[in-house]
Image (cartoon, rainbow, N blue to C red):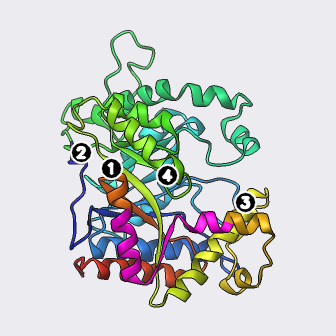
Amino acid sequence: MDDIRGKVQGTAPTPLSVLDLATVGAGQTSTDALHAAVRIARTADRRGFTRHWVAEHHSMPGVASSSPAVILAHLAAHTERVRLGSGGVMLPNHAPLVIAEQFGTLEALAPGRVDLGLGRAPGTDGATAAALRRTDRLHEGADDFPEQLAELIRFLDDDFPDGHPYRRIHAVPGPVQATTAGGVQSPHRPQIWLLGSSGFSARLAGMMGLPFSFAHHFSARNTIPALDLYRESFRPSAVLDAPYAMIGVSAFAADEAKEARRQVLTGALNMVRLRRGAPGLVPTPEEAEAHSFSAVEQDFIDDWLSNVVHGTPDEVRAGLDDLQKRTGADELMLTANAHTQDARVRSYELIADAYGMPDLG
């Protein structure tokens, strides 16, 4: 198994990684968003970021990442070093065998570079989740998560016991090819991470000895309790001998603090609309600045932006350093949600420069 732990670059307090939602802004197409995703992945690859993950969301006009495996296959063709993964695939939405086949294919395309981050939330509203799963029993899907996870791992390892109804079913590409006449064993397998925004997955990840990624960027109040629970629950495994926790962080750097504020306000307004049940394209900075927020909306905006590390590169570096000290996170995964694609790419460059991370060309 490849080492899960990332490598610190420059003066960063931990390894740094990237989470991309392939956001679609007003006046843009999904093609534009996916081209930007390639640019961001190339930047992550060149500047020494450890991972580049994409998230699964559905029925949201402003997010083009409904099919992580498809996007990751494309990114694999445009990168060389950065680990590629899902942040995450929502396991209850899919048959475990399908996920094992998709990520086994990705591992064959990019050996030793594939992470399989798994969540138990639907990544969308209830009606869309019902359409995805062909059932209205959504709560049952979340409750079945541990069993679905165990099934997925057995497909990835090809080790169902004798007598199991799936014993003769194999996820291909996968280990069964090595036990077939003339087969050769691959030294790599997708690395499984559990994702969460509460304590359920934190405890499960700890009990299974798996790495854990917490969604600090939209559940900041639960970050430290969830990480504490993960560490307290941790049991060493063949995967990890000690806890390894990553947190997702909204972070945005610009040459001037005012410009950083303009950009992150677009994402904040988009969240206001999402909370109203009216998700849309990410608004332009001009639209966000001109928007008249109600008192309730302004309170939400202020609270939301208090957890977005933004400003000049030096300000962002100081904010990330402080966050890492407060949480003890082993890795920080940065997401830059804003309308302007050039500004998003430049934000990652500026953060890398602020930490003296290499330019690998």
SS class, disc 2: loop
Name the residue rendered at 26%, 65% in the picture.
13
Q: Quadrant location of residue 240?
A: top left
Instruction: Bin the neighbour count of mark 1 within 10 Å (Cα to Cα): few under 14, some 14-19, many 20 and up.
Output: many
Q: Amino acid at mark 1?
A: Glu
Label located before the other in sequence (3 or 4): 4
Q: Are marks 3 and 4 in contact (CB under 8 Å)?
A: no
Q: Which residue is mark 1?
A: 107
Label located before the other in sequence (2 or 4): 2
Instruction: Bin the neighbour count of mark 3 within 10 Å (Cα to Cα): few under 14, some 14-19, many 20 and up.
Output: few
Q: Are marks 2 and 3 in contact (CB under 8 Å)?
A: no
Closer to the observer: label 4 or label 1?
4
Q: Return the x and y of residue 119 as percentages of the image width and height.
A: 51, 42
Which quadrant does the N terminus fall into?
A: top left
Q: Which residue is mark 2?
A: 188
Q: Return the x and y of residue 185 as percentages of the image width and height.
A: 19, 39
Label located before the other in sequence (4 or 1): 1
Give me the C-alpha separation between circle 3 and circle 4. 17 Å
Q: Residue furthest top?
A: 163
Q: Which residues are magenta?
A: 301-322
Q: Which residue is mark 3?
A: 274
Q: Are marks 2 and 4 in contact (CB under 8 Å)?
A: no
Give me the C-alpha separation between circle 2 and circle 3. 39 Å
Q: Are marks 2 and 1 in contact (CB under 8 Å)?
A: yes
Give me the C-alpha separation between circle 4 and circle 1. 25 Å
